[in-house]
Image: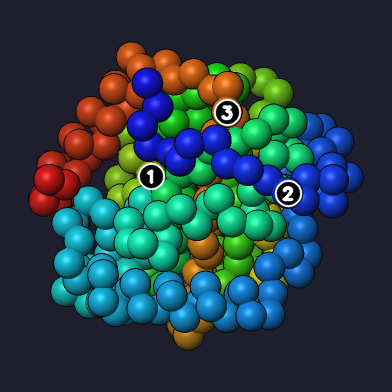
Amino acid sequence: MIDDATPVATATGVEEFTQYREDYLRDGFVVVRDFFTGEGFDELAGELDRYVAEVVPTLPDSDAFFQDRKSPETLKQMQHMVDPFFVEYGTREPFVSLAEALMGEPVRAQKPEWFNKPPGTDHPTPPHQDNFYINLDPPPLTMWLAMDPVDAENGCLRYCTGTHREGLRPHARTQVLGFSQGISDWNKEDESREVEVFLEPGDLAVHHGELIHRADPNRTTDRHRRAFALVYYAGSAERNTEAHQQYMQQVVQQHEGMGLEADG
Ligand SMILES: O=C(O)CCC(=O)C(=O)O
């Protein structure tokens, strides 16, 4: 059973985005410039600020990750955002139409996530494949909307082109909160296939759930690297529940090892 996504959503503008499907299927990612700008972007940015100020202080440790819990400005990740504004955000246009165009069938949306690399923090994103965490067939896709300018200095995403066509790689436990598992046989050839994804606010990167990706730490002293993320499941997707339970146990073990309070 899949209980962590909306029911299959209605999309009304799929044709506008079918042009991106060929590149997505070949490379495992696409970048759509100026995807979400203007009033929609400003509203989202304002709601994210409100969520950070008002909701995050009420969340359990397992739903909002800090580099240093005692310093609110080091907030680096929000999981499965739960208030009324966000809970069904993934059913909105233009996100849901792009998801359906890329997936080739109607989709379901997970609750949104938010990723930051606060300035001056040593917080790399280990190489991983999202479907090692999510365990769906067919694999999901992730949309990553830049809320700040993103470049090599502040920790842009790095996509390993074409790796989504080669299956899941072995993962092992990491010390990075929020990314409990990383690829354990990461090598020079993977690195040679990497594409750096530089984005401006409102640009969107979308990656296939089995595309290998990672990001360096933010090496700047004054620039955040915030992104709003939506994960979509194919309407027909089935979960490998055994693999998923195993992954969830690994997350719990990581959180316990780091002294985090459990959710619920
Ligand atoms: O923001 C990051 O550094 C990583 C995000 C990521 O791995 C994802 O959205 O799948």
Residue at the disc numbered 2: 12
How far, Cα to Cα, is label 1 from label 3? Answer: 26 Å
- Mark 1 or mark 3, which is nearer to you? 3
- Give the mark, 3 or 2, whose residue is nearer the N terminus: 2
For residue 110, the mark is none
Amino acid carrying label 1: it is Phe
Q: Give left or right: position of 99 versus 65.
A: right
Determine if residue 248 is in view: yes
- Mark 3 or mark 2, which is nearer to you? 2
How far, Cα to Cα, is label 3 from label 2? Answer: 16 Å
Q: Residues within 10 Å of mark 2 (few under 14, many from 20)?
A: some
Amino acid carrying label 2: it is Thr
Q: Residues within 10 Å of mark 3 (few under 14, many from 20)?
A: some
**Residue at 72% across / 43% down in the picture?**
29
- Check the image and name the residue furthest to the bottom: 222
Residue 58: image location, x then y, percent: 17, 67
